[in-house]
Amino acid sequence: MLSVERLHKRYAGLKVMEDFSLELEQGRVHCLFGPSGCGKTTFLRILAGLTAPDAGSIRMPQDELSVAAVFQEDRLLPWLTVRDNIAYSVESRMGRSAALAEAELWGERVGLGDFLGALPSQLSGGMQRRVAIARALVCQAELLFLDEPFKGLDYALKQELMGLVREECRRKGQTVLFVTHDPEEAYCLADRVYMVEGPPLSVAKELDVDAFLREITGEEEGAALQRFRALLTQSGRMDTN
Ligand SMILES: Nc1ncnc2c1ncn2[C@@H]1O[C@H](COP(=O)(O)OP(=O)(O)OP(=O)(O)O)[C@@H](O)[C@H]1O
Protein backbone atom coordinates (compact mmCIF):
# COMPACT_ATOMS: atom_id res chain seq x y z
CA MET A 1 0.00 0.00 0.00
CA LEU A 2 2.87 2.36 0.73
CA SER A 3 6.47 1.76 -0.05
CA VAL A 4 9.27 3.94 1.22
CA GLU A 5 12.49 3.55 -0.66
CA ARG A 6 15.98 4.59 0.27
CA LEU A 7 15.26 7.80 2.15
CA HIS A 8 18.09 10.11 3.12
CA LYS A 9 17.76 13.16 5.37
CA ARG A 10 20.26 15.43 7.03
CA TYR A 11 19.74 18.43 9.35
CA ALA A 12 22.84 20.60 9.03
CA GLY A 13 25.60 18.38 10.48
CA LEU A 14 23.26 15.63 11.67
CA LYS A 15 22.44 12.66 9.47
CA VAL A 16 19.00 11.44 10.61
CA MET A 17 18.16 9.02 7.81
CA GLU A 18 20.44 6.99 5.63
CA ASP A 19 19.10 4.68 2.95
CA PHE A 20 15.99 3.93 5.02
CA SER A 21 13.31 1.74 3.43
CA LEU A 22 10.04 0.37 4.75
CA GLU A 23 6.77 -1.13 3.47
CA LEU A 24 3.30 -0.57 4.91
CA GLU A 25 0.73 -3.23 4.25
CA GLN A 26 -2.89 -2.32 3.63
CA GLY A 27 -5.17 -2.65 6.66
CA ARG A 28 -2.36 -3.40 9.11
CA VAL A 29 -1.12 -1.55 12.18
CA HIS A 30 2.64 -0.93 11.97
CA CYS A 31 4.83 0.38 14.75
CA LEU A 32 8.11 2.21 14.34
CA PHE A 33 9.81 1.41 17.63
CA GLY A 34 13.04 3.07 18.64
CA PRO A 35 14.74 5.25 21.23
CA SER A 36 14.10 8.93 21.72
CA GLY A 37 15.87 11.12 19.17
CA CYS A 38 16.54 8.37 16.63
CA GLY A 39 14.56 10.08 13.84
CA LYS A 40 11.05 8.61 14.12
CA THR A 41 9.18 11.92 14.04
CA THR A 42 11.25 13.10 11.10
CA PHE A 43 10.23 9.95 9.26
CA LEU A 44 6.52 10.50 9.98
CA ARG A 45 6.82 14.12 8.91
CA ILE A 46 8.36 13.03 5.62
CA LEU A 47 5.52 10.54 5.05
CA ALA A 48 2.93 13.19 5.88
CA GLY A 49 4.56 15.60 3.40
CA LEU A 50 5.58 18.10 6.09
CA THR A 51 9.34 17.63 5.69
CA ALA A 52 11.15 17.00 2.43
CA PRO A 53 13.68 14.16 2.24
CA ASP A 54 17.06 14.87 0.63
CA ALA A 55 16.73 11.73 -1.49
CA GLY A 56 14.52 8.66 -1.86
CA SER A 57 10.93 8.04 -2.80
CA ILE A 58 7.53 7.21 -1.34
CA ARG A 59 5.26 5.16 -3.56
CA MET A 60 1.57 4.53 -3.20
CA PRO A 61 -0.63 2.48 -5.53
CA GLN A 62 -3.24 5.21 -5.79
CA ASP A 63 -2.27 8.79 -6.54
CA GLU A 64 -4.22 10.15 -3.66
CA LEU A 65 -4.73 8.46 -0.32
CA SER A 66 -6.54 10.24 2.47
CA VAL A 67 -4.25 10.78 5.45
CA ALA A 68 -4.93 11.72 9.07
CA ALA A 69 -2.23 12.27 11.65
CA VAL A 70 -1.69 12.86 15.35
CA PHE A 71 1.61 14.56 16.09
CA GLN A 72 3.29 14.95 19.45
CA GLU A 73 2.05 18.48 19.84
CA ASP A 74 -1.74 18.37 19.66
CA ARG A 75 -2.21 21.39 17.37
CA LEU A 76 -5.77 22.07 18.49
CA LEU A 77 -7.32 25.32 17.36
CA PRO A 78 -7.48 27.32 20.62
CA TRP A 79 -10.52 29.40 19.66
CA LEU A 80 -12.68 26.35 18.83
CA THR A 81 -14.50 24.09 21.28
CA VAL A 82 -13.75 20.38 21.57
CA ARG A 83 -16.76 19.66 19.35
CA ASP A 84 -15.64 22.12 16.68
CA ASN A 85 -12.01 21.01 16.81
CA ILE A 86 -13.09 17.44 16.05
CA ALA A 87 -15.63 18.53 13.42
CA TYR A 88 -13.20 20.89 11.69
CA SER A 89 -11.38 18.28 9.60
CA VAL A 90 -14.56 16.69 8.19
CA GLU A 91 -16.84 19.71 7.87
CA SER A 92 -16.02 20.49 4.25
CA ARG A 93 -16.62 16.87 3.25
CA MET A 94 -19.72 16.10 5.35
CA GLY A 95 -21.36 19.46 5.86
CA ARG A 96 -21.67 21.18 9.21
CA SER A 97 -24.50 19.31 10.88
CA ALA A 98 -23.21 15.81 10.00
CA ALA A 99 -19.69 16.86 11.05
CA LEU A 100 -20.96 18.09 14.41
CA ALA A 101 -22.90 14.86 14.98
CA GLU A 102 -19.78 12.79 14.18
CA ALA A 103 -17.69 15.05 16.40
CA GLU A 104 -20.04 14.48 19.32
CA LEU A 105 -19.94 10.74 18.78
CA TRP A 106 -16.14 10.71 18.74
CA GLY A 107 -15.88 13.15 21.62
CA GLU A 108 -17.95 10.72 23.66
CA ARG A 109 -15.97 7.70 22.50
CA VAL A 110 -12.76 9.23 23.82
CA GLY A 111 -14.48 10.04 27.12
CA LEU A 112 -15.01 13.76 26.60
CA GLY A 113 -18.81 13.78 26.39
CA ASP A 114 -19.02 16.31 29.22
CA PHE A 115 -16.45 18.63 27.63
CA LEU A 116 -17.76 19.03 24.09
CA GLY A 117 -18.34 22.74 24.64
CA ALA A 118 -15.01 23.38 26.38
CA LEU A 119 -12.08 25.24 24.84
CA PRO A 120 -8.64 23.54 24.65
CA SER A 121 -7.33 25.93 27.34
CA GLN A 122 -9.89 24.47 29.76
CA LEU A 123 -8.62 20.91 29.24
CA SER A 124 -5.77 18.96 30.80
CA GLY A 125 -2.90 17.78 28.60
CA GLY A 126 -4.33 14.25 28.49
CA MET A 127 -7.75 15.57 27.48
CA GLN A 128 -6.21 17.58 24.67
CA ARG A 129 -4.48 14.40 23.50
CA ARG A 130 -7.85 12.67 23.39
CA VAL A 131 -9.28 15.48 21.25
CA ALA A 132 -6.36 15.07 18.85
CA ILE A 133 -6.99 11.31 18.65
CA ALA A 134 -10.74 11.83 18.09
CA ARG A 135 -9.98 14.39 15.39
CA ALA A 136 -7.77 11.88 13.57
CA LEU A 137 -10.23 8.99 13.91
CA VAL A 138 -13.28 10.97 12.76
CA CYS A 139 -11.62 11.45 9.35
CA GLN A 140 -11.76 7.71 8.56
CA ALA A 141 -8.65 8.23 6.46
CA GLU A 142 -7.06 5.37 4.54
CA LEU A 143 -3.72 6.11 6.18
CA LEU A 144 -3.28 7.07 9.79
CA PHE A 145 0.01 8.36 11.22
CA LEU A 146 0.30 8.56 14.99
CA ASP A 147 3.35 10.03 16.72
CA GLU A 148 3.43 8.82 20.33
CA PRO A 149 -0.34 9.22 20.49
CA PHE A 150 -0.73 8.03 24.08
CA LYS A 151 2.07 10.07 25.62
CA GLY A 152 1.05 11.57 28.95
CA LEU A 153 -2.09 9.46 29.37
CA ASP A 154 -2.66 7.36 32.45
CA TYR A 155 -2.47 3.61 32.14
CA ALA A 156 -6.21 2.82 32.11
CA LEU A 157 -6.97 5.52 29.56
CA LYS A 158 -4.09 4.43 27.38
CA GLN A 159 -5.41 0.86 27.36
CA GLU A 160 -8.89 2.10 26.51
CA LEU A 161 -7.71 4.33 23.66
CA MET A 162 -5.41 1.66 22.25
CA GLY A 163 -8.42 -0.66 22.15
CA LEU A 164 -10.46 2.02 20.39
CA VAL A 165 -7.76 2.69 17.78
CA ARG A 166 -7.31 -1.03 17.11
CA GLU A 167 -11.02 -1.67 16.82
CA GLU A 168 -11.58 1.26 14.46
CA CYS A 169 -8.61 0.51 12.25
CA ARG A 170 -9.58 -3.13 11.98
CA ARG A 171 -13.21 -2.28 11.24
CA LYS A 172 -12.37 0.20 8.50
CA GLY A 173 -9.28 -1.55 7.16
CA GLN A 174 -7.18 1.55 7.80
CA THR A 175 -3.44 1.33 7.40
CA VAL A 176 -1.71 2.71 10.46
CA LEU A 177 1.85 3.69 11.26
CA PHE A 178 2.47 4.71 14.82
CA VAL A 179 5.65 5.72 16.53
CA THR A 180 6.61 4.87 20.07
CA HIS A 181 9.49 4.04 22.37
CA ASP A 182 7.14 2.22 24.74
CA PRO A 183 7.34 -1.59 24.25
CA GLU A 184 3.92 -2.17 25.83
CA GLU A 185 2.26 0.15 23.32
CA ALA A 186 4.09 -1.52 20.46
CA TYR A 187 3.04 -4.95 21.63
CA CYS A 188 -0.58 -4.10 22.39
CA LEU A 189 -1.34 -2.14 19.24
CA ALA A 190 0.84 -3.33 16.39
CA ASP A 191 0.54 -6.18 13.92
CA ARG A 192 4.15 -5.59 12.84
CA VAL A 193 6.96 -3.81 14.60
CA TYR A 194 9.91 -2.13 12.89
CA MET A 195 12.68 -1.81 15.44
CA VAL A 196 15.05 1.01 14.60
CA GLU A 197 18.09 2.70 16.01
CA GLY A 198 19.68 5.98 15.13
CA PRO A 199 20.30 8.65 14.20
CA PRO A 200 20.62 7.89 11.42
CA LEU A 201 17.61 5.62 10.85
CA SER A 202 18.98 3.05 8.52
CA VAL A 203 17.93 -0.59 8.66
CA ALA A 204 14.68 -1.56 10.38
CA LYS A 205 14.36 -4.98 11.98
CA GLU A 206 10.89 -6.16 10.97
CA LEU A 207 9.16 -8.42 13.50
CA ASP A 208 5.70 -9.77 14.21
CA VAL A 209 4.53 -9.01 17.75
CA ASP A 210 5.52 -12.36 19.23
CA ALA A 211 9.03 -12.11 17.82
CA PHE A 212 9.16 -8.51 19.09
CA LEU A 213 8.20 -9.69 22.55
CA ARG A 214 10.94 -12.32 22.53
CA GLU A 215 13.39 -9.71 21.29
CA ILE A 216 12.71 -7.23 24.07
CA THR A 217 12.23 -9.66 26.95
CA GLY A 218 14.90 -12.09 25.83
CA GLU A 219 12.74 -15.00 26.85
CA GLU A 220 10.31 -17.50 25.41
CA GLU A 221 8.19 -17.87 28.52
CA GLY A 222 8.26 -16.30 31.94
CA ALA A 223 7.09 -13.39 34.01
CA ALA A 224 7.48 -10.73 31.34
CA LEU A 225 5.55 -12.78 28.84
CA GLN A 226 2.75 -13.41 31.30
CA ARG A 227 2.58 -9.72 32.09
CA PHE A 228 2.27 -8.86 28.42
CA ARG A 229 -0.37 -11.55 27.96
CA ALA A 230 -2.39 -9.94 30.75
CA LEU A 231 -2.03 -6.61 28.94
CA LEU A 232 -3.11 -8.24 25.75
CA THR A 233 -6.27 -9.53 27.36
CA GLN A 234 -7.05 -6.15 28.87
CA SER A 235 -6.59 -4.38 25.57
CA GLY A 236 -8.88 -6.81 23.77
CA ARG A 237 -6.17 -8.56 21.77
CA MET A 238 -7.48 -12.01 22.55
CA ASP A 239 -6.93 -13.17 19.00
CA THR A 240 -3.16 -13.57 19.33
CA ASN A 241 -3.37 -15.39 22.66
N1 LIG B 1 13.93 20.69 12.26
C1 LIG B 1 15.05 20.18 12.77
N2 LIG B 1 16.23 20.81 12.66
C2 LIG B 1 17.37 20.29 13.15
N3 LIG B 1 17.44 19.10 13.80
C3 LIG B 1 16.30 18.42 13.96
C4 LIG B 1 15.05 18.92 13.46
N4 LIG B 1 14.07 18.01 13.76
C5 LIG B 1 14.70 17.02 14.42
N5 LIG B 1 16.03 17.25 14.54
C6 LIG B 1 17.02 16.37 15.16
O1 LIG B 1 16.96 15.11 14.49
C7 LIG B 1 17.08 14.04 15.42
C8 LIG B 1 15.87 13.12 15.30
O2 LIG B 1 14.73 13.84 15.78
P1 LIG B 1 13.26 13.21 15.77
O3 LIG B 1 12.35 14.19 16.42
O4 LIG B 1 12.95 12.77 14.39
O5 LIG B 1 13.48 11.92 16.70
P2 LIG B 1 12.43 10.98 17.47
O6 LIG B 1 12.95 9.60 17.34
O7 LIG B 1 11.06 11.25 16.99
O8 LIG B 1 12.57 11.50 18.96
P3 LIG B 1 11.47 11.49 20.16
O9 LIG B 1 11.07 10.06 20.37
O10 LIG B 1 12.25 12.05 21.32
O11 LIG B 1 10.36 12.36 19.71
C9 LIG B 1 17.24 14.66 16.80
O12 LIG B 1 18.62 14.71 17.11
C10 LIG B 1 16.71 16.07 16.62
O13 LIG B 1 17.36 16.97 17.47
Image: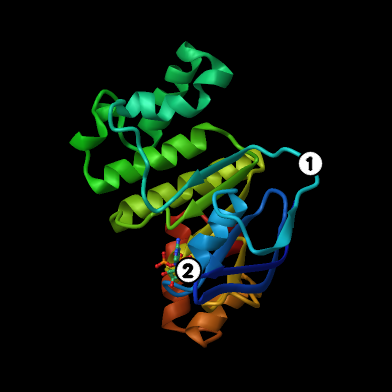
Report whether residue 3 is seen.
Answer: no
Q: Position of residue 121 (x, y in %)?
A: 21, 36
Question: What secondary structure is found at the residue carrying circle 1?
Answer: loop
- Report if the CB atoms under discs 2 and 1 are less than 8 Å apart: no
- Quadrant position of residue 114: top left
Q: Is residue 131 left or right of residue 5?
A: left
Q: Give the residue displayed 42% in from the left and 18% down from the top.
A: 100
Which residue position holds label 1?
A: 62
Name the kind of residue labelled 1 in the image: Gln
Q: Amino acid at mark 2?
A: Arg
Q: Which residue is at the front of the view, 72 or 234?
A: 72
| Vertical comparison of 44 with 110: above or below | below
The residue that appears at 36% across and 45% down in the rendered structure is 74
* The furthest residue to the front: 12
Which of these two is toward me, 179 or 219? 179
Image coordinates for residue 143, horizontal then vertical, percent? 63, 45
Q: Quadrant of ligand 1?
A: bottom left
Q: Quadrant of residue 120?
A: top left
Task: State which mark lies toward you, 2 or 1.
Answer: 1
The residue that appears at 60% across and 48% down in the rendered structure is 49
Please tell me the numbered disc located at residue 229.
2
Residue under the image location 56 percent in, 77 percent down? 200
